[in-house]
Amino acid sequence: MIESAVHRGVILGGLALYGLLVLVTVEIDPARIAEGLSRTGAFFVGWLRPDFVTRWTDIRAGLLESLAMTAVATAAALLLSVPLGLGAARNLVPGPVYTTARGVLAVARAFHEILVAILFVAMFGFGPFAGVVTLVLGSVGFLGKLLAEAVEEVDPAPLEALTTAGASWGSRVVFGVLPQVMPRVMGLVLYRLDINFRESAVIGLVGAGGIGATLTTAVSRYEFESVSAILILIIGMVFGAEVIAGRLRQRLL
Amino acid sequence: MSEGRPALRIRDLVVRYGRAAPVICGVSVELDPKEIVGLIGASAAGKSTLLRAIQRLVEPESGRIFLYGLELTRLPRAELRGARRRLGMIFQEHALIERLTVMENVLAGTLGRTGFWRSVRRRFEPEDVEEAFDLLERVGLTGLEDSRCDELSGGQKQRVGIARALIQHPDVLLVDEPTASLDPATSVRIMDLITEICSERGLAAIINLHDVPLARRFCPRIIGLQDGGVVFDGPPSALDDAVLQRVYGDEAISTQADATADGETVGH
């Protein structure tokens, strides 16, 4: 590939020098590697022997807290995102309203949930309240934006028909827009419920309550059997949520 | 509704979208009460735009439009809603809310006089609900009140659209290609229904039609639009090949041939 022998030599030499520097800079401690390997072993052994019993009270409390956070946050986010989503639909509102609503939604989505959770934990202290606020913010950004897009895609003909009947803006939304976007909104809310449950486990890691807090505690105590039990429960609940959501979707649409 | 005045008077109407050439350039038309006018013309002649301008779904650039003496073109937004109720519109593709029931779609026509919260809770006035039942019977949809509109056939949907326009208690019907998506036999039945209802209720109507034989058969007066201007205004008997050539240009011959081939619409 490189034709000049001199260039090839310089490049290879440079790479070798770089590798050497890296080795020197990164402290490689054989003792720590050995310790880590034994812990990896403990982790896998624990993974194979999930322990639901020892920490059951903590796990149960964590799961219930996560479920409550998920439900409260999703419901609150739905209430907030309907006006924002309608306001962020170009076919329904004048320019300034559109720009403002889009701006709010963009800010709500600007940072990853973990960052937001860290900020809110710093503001409101440890516990589920910071977690709920985090989830609401993230869900409003998500639901609001996707609702706005669904509204912008509605068939304009029925809306026009309602206009010619002399319907007010509110009645046009209730009759012409909502029935058209309802199936989509239902799907999005169910999906967001799912995301919020998983998310509640993650933001718990930075102190925002829920099953994530229980998980962090178990990890820092090296109780891998409990960690395993918690992870299995999270998987099970996400899976269960999927099944329930599927049933609901079939029923509602 | 005061007698003696024209139902609809359009004077020197000019409509354009953005900076493009005007779509309607200087149309003047008068419609007597109870008069049914068929509006024919090629697809880009401005037929739909004319109806949309009367409803002020597009704002005319200049010209004046009067509905029984009320100048629509000068109305402030707030009063426009009330005036729109008096113009019942029937649409090319029905423009129904597919996921709502037949009943809800008909009652949507009363939204101009139903308050917002009543509409949210679907608490319509009992006399409106009763009228909706009567209208559905009149258009031949008795028994389908609770069906969702996406379960209906094209002709049935158009009947719902007609009932929705009528429950507004309009003075004038604006009908945009009512048969565009229907088969020939259904088209004739729908045109029958619309014209019968107009004479029952003393409504004036402008009906956009792409189908010349259908216009001849159902409309005592025909207006031909070409490139946004009126090139013909008279009874169907005056609508000869020369006129059609003027209205449709080169399209004329093929339009006539297609329509005659339908068979269903020849017997005028």
Image (spheres, helix red, strand yellow):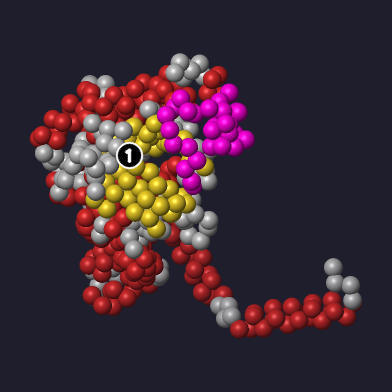
Residue B128 drawn at (x, y percent) = 14, 35
With B71 as the anchor, is B122 left or right in this view? Answer: left
Above or below: residue B245 compared with residue A236 = above
The spot of residue B24 in percent (x, y) is: 46, 50
Main SS category, magenta section: helix
Residue A43 shows in the view: yes
Of all chains, the one bearing label 1 is: B
Query: So how many labels did they put on this image?
Result: 1
Give x and y (percent) for residue B136. 23, 26
Q: Residue at x 53, y 70 (%)?
A: A34
In the image, residue B239 lies in the stretch drawn in magenta: yes
Say if A116 sits above or below B167 in the image.
Answer: below
Magenta stretch in the rendered image: B228-257
Residue drawn 29% across the image and 46% down it: A164
Mark 1, residue position: B31
In this view, the residue farthest toward the left is: B126
Q: Position of residue A108 (x, y in %)?
A: 35, 67
Does the magenta segment cover residue B6? Answer: no
**Amino acid type at mark 1:** Leu
